[in-house]
Image (cartoon, rainbow, N blue to C red):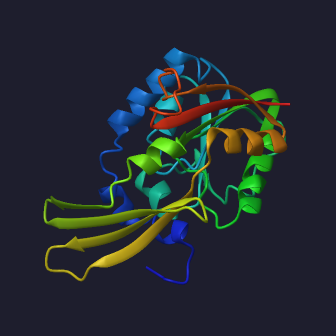
Amino acid sequence: MNDSQPWFVRAFAREYLEVYRHRSPVQGQQQVNQMLGAGLLPARGRVLDLCCGAGRHLLPMRASGLDAVGLDLSQVLLKAGKLAGIAVRADARAIPYAGATFDVVTNLFSSFGYFPDDEAHHAVLLEVRRVLKPDGRLVIDHMNAAVTIADLQPESVEQRDGLTLKQTRHYDATEKRVIKDVEYTPDGMTPRHWSESVRLFTPAELDEFLTQAGLEPTARFGDLDGSCFDESTSRRQVVVARAR
């Protein structure tokens, strides 16, 4: 891993698939089924899965009949998912599609807030607005800041099939970021280290960012199943925003 690269380039390498192996294709299928059942995804339409990773949501979207494509910056994850021809490698700040292309854009598993400054996050939302059709929808799945901070586990150590995985976490209140340091040690090998740093947005902050980008928040749920959102108890906030 090249320490000079941004964390979101270094972190989404082959080790990511092991660290987050519980985020499996089976779970992805279940979550897409939930989104379809809750009306978060339409039965038909053109969908962009922004930051699609290895395609655990993209592939079941396509299997359901949606005309879905993906975008991710990690060539490793795109190759792992065998997404050639259905996903592009690109930066979310410069989506390589024409304006008014998509009925829905999805951004799942807290893949918003990666960049070091809010100007870049605003640029992502402006690009989402540009590629959505009029009245198209963004479905963004982000951590619920209050509960994430309250429940943050400072340290965990796991032993998995010849691998030791140590993770330490803290919240930087000044930068409003959850920072996780990962030590990944296969048996008999030198440890590999990297950090993850995700900007947290409160519901009010996220609504403001969406509105500034021309996206009107219309609903907020506690999960991808469409359950009710409670700022004091919900672990996630799933926001639907309409392109104005």
Residue 69 visible here: yes
Q: How many marks?
A: 0
Which residue is located at x 46 percent, y 22 percent?
A: 34
117, 74: nearer the viewer: 117
225, 66: nearer the viewer: 225
Q: Is residue 54 above or below residue 90?
A: above
Query: Going by the image, does 212 lie left or right of 96?
Result: right
Which residue is located at x 34 percent, y 42 percent?
A: 24
Residue 108 visible here: no
Q: Quadrant of residue 218?
A: top right
Query: Going by the image, does 225 lie left or right of 139?
Result: left
Which residue is located at x 62 percent, y 20 percent?
A: 42
Which residue is located at x 52 percent, y 20 percent?
A: 36
Q: Is residue 232 above or below residue 128?
A: above
* Position of residue 221 measured from the top left corner of the image (x, y, whole percent): 55, 26
Quadrant containing the N terminus is bottom left
Query: Going by the image, does 240 lie left or right of 224?
Result: right
Query: Going by the image, does 243 lie left or right of 44?
Result: right
Q: Quadrant of residue 5?
A: bottom right
Quadrant containing the C terminus is top right
* Position of residue 43 measured from the top left corner of the image (x, y, whole percent): 59, 17
* Position of residue 48 measured from the top left corner of the image (x, y, whole percent): 65, 39
Q: Is residue 230 above or below residue 202?
A: above
